[in-house]
Image: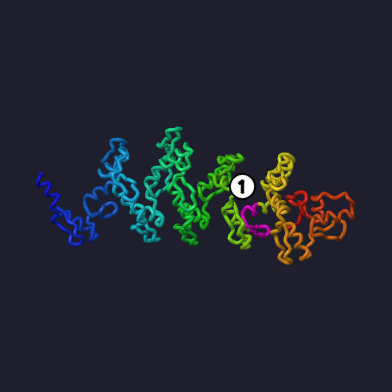
Amino acid sequence: MEDHMTGHKEKRYECDVCGKAWQHPYQLETHRRVHTGERPFDCSECGKSFKTAQVLKIHRRVHTGECPFDCSDCGKSFKTSQVLKIHQRVHTGEKPYGCSTCGKSYAGWAGLQQHRRVHSSERPFTCSDCGKGFKSSPDLLMHRRLHTGERPYTCSDCGKGFTRSKILMEHQRTHTDERPYTCALCGKGYTRSTYLLSHQRMHTGDRSFHRPFGCSDCSKDFKRAGELKIHRRLHTGEMPYGCSVCSKSFKTTYELKSHQRVHSSERPFACSDCGKGFKSSSELNVHGRVHTGERPYSCIDCGKGFKSSTDLKVHWRLHTGERPFTCSDCGKGFKSSTHLKVHWRLHTGERPFTCSDCGKGFKSSTHLKTHMRLHTGERPFTCSDCGKDFTQSGSLQVHQRIHTGERPFTCNQCGKGFTRSTYLLSHQRVHSGDRPIPNLVCGERFAMASHALCHQRVHTSGQPYDCPYCSEAFDSSWGLQQHWRIHGGEQLLPLQQAFQESTGTAGGPADTHQGEILCVR
């Protein structure tokens, strides 16, 4: 016993580089390799080198698959006794390594060491390609695969590759339908423990628990720390994932991967119903609901259903009045970033979507798609009451209010109802006296764009409404109507018929309402 205790005290072999002492000369020899970088033990399978024969022996188990240390609680196997010891703390709940800064505890010393870097912001492992720093070497190794494209873990069922063995294991459950994580309250099963944790939060009404990760900048809450981390990039402006083709940057690898398909025109996710291709599985999933009619996201205020949570989120802003996306040029607010992007083209004059038949440009692909129906004659939206066809679902919806008498947009000043929000907006200017639309020639201002357009013809001598009975022409349909009384007394031609005769077109204005001056655009 005395000799044994003496062994603890006597450390006669000192390193001449750092001064650290050891009890045995072989320990000093092994330690010196830290300074020299010497790794004399090579793996015959992969060529990787190690400082000691023991570490090489453990590494060899990666190739052989040998895991000789079994957990008596769950049967899981491990390559080393040390890793098994750390794992067993999952069952015992033991976390002997505590952080002195925040008190958080860990089962292993390595976990604590990595955690401490959260407080120090230390990122000692740096990517040689992009310079990004990481808290641990495994994190750097995973990141490097973004640059190399390496996916060493392959699914034996479908051949799909993965960067991590854990992700492969979770993926394989899609083939076996294994759901090992079960909710104790409702019995629902999940393939990942994180999915179960998120689900369990649905059983509680406590928002702080339901979304425990709060943003310190905008107070928005998230269910997962990873979601908060990505969200924080909205505030910091960080875009760590850059496209090698156009240098555009993105907040997540998923966004980058989807974007890169713009350059390759790759659409790997095809709809089994109509054959349409999509850049991501999530886009295909949402599109599939067009065929099934599924609307899993419902508004708690009006009951309207939506194909995606994003659509519901944008719709909800109709009720709250929230318009978080503001134009830096004119200050106008929008419910979604897409609406703002389309609006911005009013200022830039950009028309990136061009009609192949007539060459006309449009601000959005939706506008182009609607325009194309003028050439094809397609009117896919039919009124079930009168059989009238429309080029847009929105036009049909507004038209149906003629049959139902519904006027959902009400003036809070006089109580008058309107079938469209734009009609309400124009009406409210009667009360406010607001005339936001100026004429660039004379400076006169108007409450409605159609009025401004008609007035503009005073300066340009534009008179597109020709009388079918004489040579007179007018700048508005209302002026033409007044003139007709000379020819036919008080009996007027229907507006639609007169428009067709005066303009020589087969179809009239797609959408008019009583009292509005109609102008050809």
Q: Position of residue 416 (x, y in %)?
A: 73, 46
Q: Looking at numbered disc 1 in the image, what kind of residue is underneath it?
A: Leu
Nearest the eye: 349 or 57: 349
Q: Is residue 465 left or right of residue 41?
A: right
Q: Position of residue 289 (x, y in %)?
A: 57, 42
Q: Position of residue 227 (x, y in %)?
A: 46, 49
Quarter of the image where the C terminus is located: bottom right
Nearest the eye: 221 or 279: 221
Is 366 included in the stretch rendered in magenta?
yes
> Within the image, what quadrant is residue 35 found in?
bottom left
Q: Image point 27% across, 38% down: which residue?
A: 70
Quarter of the image where the N terminus is located: top left
> Within the image, what quadrant is residue 168 found in?
top left
Res 134 seen here: yes
Q: Image point 60% across, 49% down: which residue?
A: 321
Q: How many marks?
A: 1
Is 18 included in the stretch rendered in magenta?
no
Part of the protein shown in magenta:
354-369
Q: Which residue is mark 1?
A: 318
Res 389 seen here: no
